[in-house]
Amino acid sequence: MNATSVDVKTVSFPKYINYNIPYLQKNFVGFKEAVAFKESQGKYTVVNTLGYLGKYQFGRTTLERFKIYNTQEFLRNPELQEKAFAAYCSVNKWILRKDIKRSVGKTINGIKITESGILAAAHLSGAGNVKKFLRSNGNKRFSDAYGSSIQSYLKKFAGYNVSNVIADRLATI
């Protein structure tokens, strides 16, 4: 061994603790923050290469559904982004209410189906694609332009308590 080598067998390392990682509970707040981190690393001003906007990476047509037309103002308004996410979850829960009732608790392609997984998958791909996936028992699949799939969202966002999301076809901001 030369003077600059270290025998790692004899070196003891202190236990690494990262105190900067917040603990997220498995409730709606934890759910929305987990989705936000996956979508934009939780950054309100992000616009991706496909033009999806904000912390939750909304498309323009989804924003227009909530009468949001000024995308620059949307990017500067965290409160509006949070309200848009909550409203979109309510609309998706209404659209998928029958599929949630039929599918939660089942296993499809090795993935246990949960309500939060379904809502996250709808955020990724739209409620219609989630319906197709669930009703085909996982045979009709969808992935976005970056390769994220309904299956990956069903798995990654499973098990959050989103029971406080009210299904509302006409949810507004």
Image (cartoon, rainbow, N blue to C red):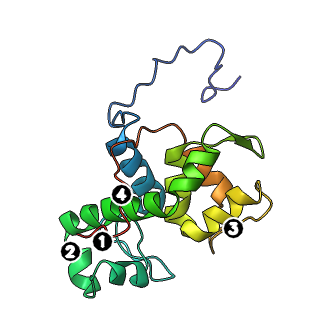
CA gap, disc 2 to disc 1? 7 Å
Q: Earlier in the sequence, mark 2 or mark 1?
A: 1
The C terminus, quarter of image:
bottom left
Q: Is residue 123 above or below residue 58?
A: above
- The label shown at residue 45 is 1
Task: Name the amino acid, label 2.
Answer: Arg
Name the foreground residue: 88 vs 41: 88
The residue pinned by badge 4 equals 42
Residue at disc 4, secondary structure: loop
Decide if residue 9 is on the left or right side of residue 170.
right
Name the foreground residue: 116 vs 103: 103
Camera sees residue 148? no
The residue pinned by badge 2 equals 76
The residue pinned by badge 3 equals 142
CA gap, disc 4 to disc 1? 9 Å
Residue at disc 2, secondary structure: loop
Q: In x, y percent, where is residue 148?
A: 63, 62
What is the quadrant of residue 151 in the picture? bottom right
Q: Earlier in the sequence, mark 3 or mark 2?
A: 2
For the point 42% across and 84% down, the residue is 61
Name the foreground residue: 142 vs 169: 169
Q: Earlier in the sequence, mark 3 or mark 4?
A: 4
Q: Earlier in the sequence, mark 1 or mark 3?
A: 1
Task: Name the amino acid, label 4.
Answer: Gly
CA gap, disc 3 to disc 2? 31 Å
Decide if residue 155 is on the left or right side of residue 67.
right
For the point 42% across and 37% down, the residue is 161
The answer to whether the residue labelled 2 contacts the one labelled 1, judged by CB atoms less than 8 Å apart, is yes
CA gap, disc 4 to disc 2? 14 Å
Closer to the observer: label 1 or label 3? 3
